[in-house]
């Protein structure tokens, strides 16, 4: 199998293997996943430049289930090296996160060092400018130049897109503050979803291996609760993988913005173990705004909104949320250089970037009363 075959068109098979933990169960489950899927076999990867892209959203420990577990990364590196690939690991954490702190706390820096593979920062290796489907953006040089991207998403709930997994992990191919700018330009969930789809179209072939042993539910992607999901999943089609995850987690794929319009084209073909997660809590999100015509947006935005709410008892006034906000909607109170941030409500576009970077879990994305009411009456999900 050549890497071209992965993309043109990508196989829609989604291989699933149960995996109870990151200790004894992991290595056999991972070996089974690769053997049964035949993804990443030596014929595919030998001699190729393979970039491994974990989800390194911010500086959290593996137990917090925000980032890809380092034990999964270690197995992927070892497999690829033994198959003859030229391996590097890279990512672009959320804009306010410090890359050194991220590598240390997530355990990813230690794994790269132990295994002798370089970690490439997407902010420091050049970019490739792209113009696709009406979207202008840049992707990091190490991603653009790879023969194959092995994406290692963590399966989590997400305040803006409900689910973050294989497709959304690829948004990390956009380096640094460009991500924040794109959030500002495309605040509506559906527009953001189309942007993520456009990014995927310009990437090299990808293989996604999803870490769903312990995922995150509730106020994801950074401040939710770790939840045992108990499986690994792999596919050469990130859309098929995410649609399969929706089915397992009992979410409507069409309620995830970046999956809209993809459900028929990327219908997953399931293989391996049957897995069903009875309960997985996701934020309701702001996707109702997508139903509102542009001319009524100003009026609708006054009553239908999702905005950050800061728990002042938890906030340590670190200022990361201020740095992450693409529209400067958070500010220190007057005359308090280190005070707890306050929200300029009219400016907020509900992108959840502040929520993603708060190290204290002090920011919750709250819905307006009107939005709660609509959801309660119509059961919109
Ligand atoms: S305050 Fe938070 S949710 Fe609102 S625009 Fe800024 S980063 Fe996005
Ligand atoms: S809300 Fe969170 S990110 Fe913002 S200043 Fe407080 S602790 Fe820091």
Image (cartoon, rainbow, N blue to C red):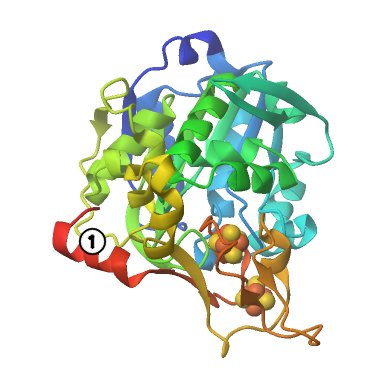
The image shows residue 235 at horizontal and vertical percentages of: 40, 29
Residue found at x 47% / y 37%: 191
The image shows residue 318 at horizontal and vertical percentages of: 73, 77
Q: Quadrant of residue 257?
A: top left
Q: Is residue 195 above or below residue 146?
A: below
Numbered-mark total: 1
Q: Is residue 102 above or below residue 63?
A: above
Which of 148 and 272 lies nearest the eye of the viewer? 148
Does residue 263 appear to the left or right of 107 in the view shown? Answer: left
Which of the four quarters of the rendered structure image does ligand 1 lie in?
bottom right
Say whether residue 70 is visible: yes
Residue found at x 23% / y 61%: 375
The residue sitting at the bottom extreme is 313
Which of 365 and 207 lies nearest the eye of the viewer? 365
The image shows residue 93 at horizontal and vertical percentages of: 67, 51
Say whether residue 74 is visible: no
Residue found at x 43% / y 31%: 238
The image shows residue 274 at horizontal and vertical percentages of: 20, 41
Q: Is mark 1 within 8 Å of ligand 1?
A: no
Identify residue for label 1. Answer: 375
Residue found at x 57% / y 22%: 134
Tell me the SS state at disc 1.
helix
């Amino acid at each position: 199998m050549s890497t071209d075959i992965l993309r043109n068109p990508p196989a829609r098979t989604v291989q699933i293997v149960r995996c109870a933990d990151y200790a004894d169960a992991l290595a056999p489950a991972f070996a089974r996943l690769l053997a049964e899927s035949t993804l990443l076999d030596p014929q595919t990867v030998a001699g190729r430049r393979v970039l491994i892209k974990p989800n390194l959203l911010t500086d959290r420990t593996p137990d917090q289930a925000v980032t890809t577990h380092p034990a999964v990364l270690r197995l992927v590196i070892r497999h690829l090296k033994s198959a003859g690939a030229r391996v590097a690991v890279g990512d672009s954490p959320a804009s306010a996160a410090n890359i050194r702190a991220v590598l240390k706390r997530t355990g990813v820096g230690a794994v790269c060092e132990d295994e002798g593979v370089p970690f490439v920062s997407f902010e420091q290796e050049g970019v490739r400018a792209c113009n696709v489907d009406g979207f202008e953006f840049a992707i990091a040089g190490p991603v653009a130049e790879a023969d194959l991207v092995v994406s290692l998403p963590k399966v989590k709930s997400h305040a803006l897109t409900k689910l973050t997994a294989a497709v959304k992990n690829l948004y990390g191919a956009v380096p640094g503050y460009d991500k924040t700018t794109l959030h500002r330009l495309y605040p509506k969930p559906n527009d953001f979803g189309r942007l993520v789809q456009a990014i995927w179209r310009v990437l090299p072939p990808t293989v996604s291996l999803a870490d769903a042993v312990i995922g995150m539910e509730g106020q994801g992607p950074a401040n939710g609760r770790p939840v045992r999901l108990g499986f690994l999943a792999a596919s050469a089609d990130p859309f098929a993988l995410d649609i399969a995850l929706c089915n397992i987690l009992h979410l409507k794929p069409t309620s995830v913005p970046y999956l809209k319009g993809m459900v028929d084209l990327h219908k997953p073909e399931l293989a391996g173990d049957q897995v069903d997660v009875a309960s997985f809590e996701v934020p309701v999100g702001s996707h109702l705004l997508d139903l509102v015509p542009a001319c009524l947006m100003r009026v609708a935005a006054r009553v239908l909104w999702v905005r950050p709410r800061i728990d002042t008892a938890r906030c340590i006034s670190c200022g990361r949320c201020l740095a992450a906000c693409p529209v400067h909607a958070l500010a220190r109170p007057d005359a308090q250089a280190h005070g707890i941030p306050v929200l300029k409500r009219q400016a907020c576009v509900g992108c959840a970037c502040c929520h993603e970077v708060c190290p204290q879990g002090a920011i919750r994305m709250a819905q307006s009363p009107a939005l709660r009411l609509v959801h309660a009456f119509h059961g919109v999900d």
